[in-house]
Image (spheres, rainbow, N blue to C red):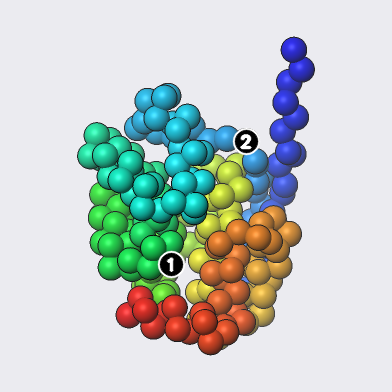
Amino acid sequence: MKRKKQKPGNKQSLAKFKKGSETYRLVAYEVTYEAMKILGLPELVEERLPVLREMVKSNPKQAIQELLVLKQNYPDAPVLYNYLCMAYEYLGNYEAARETIIENYQKTPDYLFAKINYAQMCLMEGNSDKIPEIFDGNFDLSLLYPHRTRFHVSEFTGFTGVMCAYFASIGKQDTAQMLYKSLLKVAPDERITRFAAGFLYPTFTDKLKQLLWR
């Protein structure tokens, strides 16, 4: 039986940059495409997640119905909150998305995707000053999680997209562009890349969407 080939991990290493009198060192780590084990969910529910992820895009109403039931049964599985938030956004229900993001962040503030979603919400609402606090003053995954040297591609793109948007929002265009180039290499067609572009190269539609969050 042939084993499936996995995409090789990529080493991400970004240069130093300065913000005021402080210097931030962005260090190297491996980005992998291997599937992550979802904590807090039985195997059968975990196997359902890829279907739900696609349903979030194609039929968000149906996805919300199923996700709400799963969330009630597994309230400590933060990935369900992530999917639920996305489904609400696809429907344009930003108030429900906001409530879900806040609930997830309050329940699991150390969970990376809870941080990422909360940070995206803060950026959309014009509260970029909250970003350093959310990530404990760390602007690189290796500094945020010093015990880890390997991250899933979704962790890398989510974090990098938020940081790109943050630095663009505070006028650090060179740093934002450097991060955006990394996103284009790894995930050119992902929503988080478009999110980052909305701050680095904002269009009228991007500005209108930000207004809807406020």
Q: Which structural element holds mark 2?
A: loop
Task: Where is residue 183? Give x, y as percent.
Answer: 66, 62
Which residue is at the front of the view, 176 or 137?
A: 176
Q: Earlier in the sequence, mark 2 or mark 1?
A: 2
Q: Residue at x 44, y 51 (%)?
A: 59
Q: Quadrant of residue 46?
A: top left
Q: Amino acid at mark 2?
A: Glu
Which residue is at the front of the view, 38 or 85?
A: 85
Residue 205 seen anywhere in this rendered image of the structure:
yes
Residue 143 sits above or below residue 24 on the image: above
Q: Residue furthest top?
A: 1
**Which residue is the site of mark 2?**
34
Residue 43 sits above or below residue 87 on the image: above
Q: Which structural element holds mark 1?
A: helix
Q: Is residue 114 left or right of residue 6?
A: left
Q: Residue furthest left?
A: 72
Task: Where is residue 15? Give x, y as percent.
Answer: 69, 66
Q: How many marks?
A: 2
Image quarter where the N terminus lies is: top right
Q: Residue at x 32, y 80 (%)?
A: 214
Q: Residue at x 37, y 79 (%)?
A: 212
What numbered label is drawn on residue 33?
Answer: none
Q: Amino acid at mark 1?
A: Gln
Residue 110 sits above or below residue 162 on the image: above
Q: Is residue 211 left or right of residue 75?
A: right
Task: Where is residue 130? Give x, y as percent.
Answer: 36, 72
**Which residue is the site of mark 1?**
120
Q: Residue at x 57, y 35 (%)?
A: 35
